[in-house]
């Protein structure tokens, strides 16, 4: 312990006395003794200013979108998933790539100086200290792996699935290639609403700090940290120490990243903990100015100079770790089910639930238990505060069990629903075909499970955005079982509750058709489409029914009306052109060809439009032009077996039998072979 000299004067004496005052040291956990004055950091205010600027820029981004209606997509790392899954490169993907690269060079700096969730946690930690609460880090070995596993799930698993699994399970899943997508007209499209954002901020900003310690969410819940932490290992820029260090512990006392700085620099001559977020509080608070940021050996090459002095940094035994890991996994998947919360929120809930499980186990097994300033149990007797903690924790566990039951029922229902193999074309054909006994049993089980998840009193669930999905599935299964009246009742009640939309209108019309009420289905669908000409899906389904049922005149009437109502609607023009070129009236075919030319001007390079053009030209006897159109389409889509087949048929019809036969054989081979992923 390094002494400090202080000159003072004895009472009644003119002589100065030299007194020795011992420097205050932090304890083994890095906390100063009660009543001791903590060292000051000059970095907290600077970080607050920079993090505040980040928030202002975010608000300015939102304001610009509200003002103009169009803006750059949110600079959000989770948007990188679109690049990995679908090749969509956006602002979030570029930002995350830069953050990862800079972390490999500079260390885990972004978390400490640029993350709004860190700012929220620091604010909550600061407010707690103002009222005398100093959160202590909950130290678990296995829970430290949760962020990394989440990062793998978000960013590595899609790549592994596409490369190693999809070629065998989904051979039609092709790689679309990379493309840019940097602007949006709906800034909030990928964000949850206020009803989810507020509890997320309370749990991941406040509760994780209160239960798990400063930056508890970063340590045990953030999937981005799952990549930042291991990349920090290879960074050559680290907090290092000189020989001036006296191991006073002030560095650990001021660290808001839960790093035992005094032990790290003693054992490794630098900070090697992956949790270090380069906040630089320790550097600014060091009374000897012994800490500095410098280049040198990365953490993974560091050797422990004092292995005998190392102490355990974890609160749990091996068995406790395994038990709590099971709690974390279970609670995460419970709240990530069909009725669930976003992934980042789920990870925070899982981490907090795990701590509550450990705290309850401690209350049942340990003689004395504290939670910050509250003595929950003393001398083996649970106090009122401990009983309150047990009651609150019990309510949390009961809620999770309830969610688990509902989500399990819904997932089983989806599994059974997917086993129903009756084609929708058969169910809604109007023939009222009866499925076999096995199919009926599967559909009935699925219906029973879905009914369990319905809001009380019909079931044991509760209302929410998922209710419409449940009702649509029950309606579909009811149709499979031949109960079209029940299906229509369910869909109409849902539409009355939430308002009639395109999906509901199409579903109700489809059920009417399946029940054999063809005219009613057409009348219902047409009336709702005419009231909402933008409902393209309903219009297309209605036209398909009319063409299939041989009501071509009504189909042509509605198709013309669709173009009249929406003259710039490319799909409406395409549909009208297809109906016209399939006519036997030359003037209608000519009109259809003219419309096809318009669609090709609006969207060039469409092989399907060229195939329709060839069909019309062939009807008019202009076979040379038809052959030219088919060859043009094959130049765009050489793997389209329909184009190859139609060209073969055309050649055979014009007495070029050998060439046509070769193409027909090729088309047959292409049709029988699944497309391989690119």
Image (cartoon, helix red, strand yellow):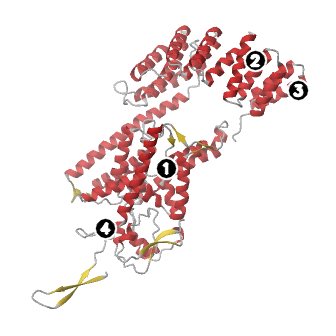
> Which image quadrant: the C terminus?
top right
Name the residue carrying label 3: 659
Secondary element type, mark 4: loop
x 83%, y 21%: residue: 650
Mark 4 vs 2: CB contact within 8 A = no
520 left or right of 165? left
Q: Earlier in the sequence, mark 3 or mark 4?
A: 4
Q: Nearer the viewer, residue 162 or 409?
A: 162
Of mark 4 and mark 1, the one earlier in the sequence is 4
Alpha carbons under labels 4 and 2: distance apart: 84 Å
Task: Give x and y (percent) for residue 337.
Answer: 45, 38
Marks 1, 3: nearer the viewer: 3
Secondary structure state at the residue bearing disc 3: helix
Q: Residue furthest bottom?
A: 15
Q: What kind of element bears circle 1?
A: helix
| Residue ID for mark 1 | 150
- Residue 584 spot, x, y in % from top left: 74, 10
Q: Dot 3: within a 10 Å radius of its alpha carbon, few (fewer than 14), some, or many (20 or more) residues?
A: some
């Amino acid at each position: 312990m390094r002494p400090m000299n202080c000159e003072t004067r004895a009472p009644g004496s003119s002589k100065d006395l030299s007194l020795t005052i011992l420097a205050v040291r932090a304890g083994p956990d890095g906390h100063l003794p009660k009543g001791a004055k903590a060292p000051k950091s000059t970095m907290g205010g600077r970080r607050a200013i920079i993090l505040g600027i980040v928030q202002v820029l975010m608000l300015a981004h939102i304001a610009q979108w509200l003002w103009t209606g169009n803006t750059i997509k949110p600079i959000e790392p989770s948007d990188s998933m679109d690049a990995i899954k679908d090749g969509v490169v956006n602002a979030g993907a570029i930002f995350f790539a830069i953050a990862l690269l800079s972390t490999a060079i500079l260390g885990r700096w972004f978390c400490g100086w640029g993350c709004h969730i860190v700012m929220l946690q620091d604010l909550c930690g600061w407010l707690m200290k103002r009222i005398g609460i100093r959160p202590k880090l909950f130290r678990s070995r296995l829970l430290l792996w949760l962020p990394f596993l989440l990062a793998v799930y978000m960013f590595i698993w899609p790549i592994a699935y596409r490369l190693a699994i999809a070629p065998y399970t989904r051979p039609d899943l092709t790689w679309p290639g990379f493309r840019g997508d940097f602007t949006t007209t709906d800034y909030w499209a990928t964000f949850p609403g206020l009803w989810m954002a507020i509890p997320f901020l309370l749990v991941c900003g406040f509760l994780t700090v209160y239960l798990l310690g400063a930056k508890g969410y970063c340590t045990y819940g953030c999937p981005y940290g799952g990549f930042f932490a291991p990349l920090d290992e290879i960074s050559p820029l680290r907090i290092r120490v000189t020989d001036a260090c006296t191991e006073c512990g002030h560095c650990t006392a001021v660290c808001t990243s839960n790093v035992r700085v005094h032990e790290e620099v003693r054992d490794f001559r630098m900070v090697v903990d992956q949790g270090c977020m380069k906040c630089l509080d320790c550097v600014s608070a060091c009374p000897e100015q012994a800490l500095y940021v410098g280049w040198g050996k990365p953490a993974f090459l560091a050797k422990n100079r004092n292995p005998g002095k190392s102490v355990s940094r974890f609160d749990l035994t091996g068995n406790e770790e395994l038990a709590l890991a099971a709690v974390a996994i279970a609670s995460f998947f419970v709240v990530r089910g069909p009725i669930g919360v976003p992934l980042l929120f789920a990870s925070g809930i899982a981490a907090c639930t795990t701590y509550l499980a450990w705290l309850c186990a401690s209350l049942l097994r340990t003689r004395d238990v504290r939670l910050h300033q509250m003595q929950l149990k003393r001398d083996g007797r649970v106090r009122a505060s401990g009983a309150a903690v047990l009651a609150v924790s019990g309510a949390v566990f009961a809620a999770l069990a309830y969610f688990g039951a509902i989500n399990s029922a819904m997932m089983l229902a989806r599994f059974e629903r997917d086993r129903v193999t009756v084609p929708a074309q058969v169910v809604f054909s109007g023939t009222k075909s009866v499925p076999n006994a096995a199919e009926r049993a599967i559909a009935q089980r699925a219906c029973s499970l879905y009914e369990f998840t319905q809001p009380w009193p019909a079931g044991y669930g509760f209302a929410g955005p998922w209710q419409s999905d449940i009702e649509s599935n029950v309606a579909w299964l009811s149709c499979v079982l031949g109960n079209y009246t029940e299906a229509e009742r369910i869909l109409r009640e849902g539409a009355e509750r939430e308002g009639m939309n395109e999906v509901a209108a199409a579903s109700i019309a489809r059920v009417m058709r399946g029940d054999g009420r063809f005219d009613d289905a057409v009348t219902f669908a047409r009336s709702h489409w005419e009231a909402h000409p933008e409902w393209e899906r309903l219009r297309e389904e209605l036209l398909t029914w009319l063409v299939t049922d041989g009501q071509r005149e009504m189909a042509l009437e509605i198709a013309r009306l669709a173009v009249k109502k929406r003259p710039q609607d490319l799909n409406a023009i395409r549909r009208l052109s297809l109906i016209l070129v399939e006519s036997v009236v030359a003037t209608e075919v000519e009109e259809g060809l003219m419309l096809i030319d318009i669609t090709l001007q609006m969207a060039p390079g469409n092989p399907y439009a060229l195939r329709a053009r060839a069909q019309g030209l062939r009807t008019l006897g202009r076979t040379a032009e038809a052959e030219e159109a088919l060859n043009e389409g094959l130049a765009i889509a050489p793997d389209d077996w329909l184009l190859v087949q139609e060209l073969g048929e055309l050649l055979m019809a014009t007495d070029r039998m050998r060439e046509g036969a070769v193409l027909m054989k090729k088309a047959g081979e292409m049709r029988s072979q699944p497309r391989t992923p690119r």
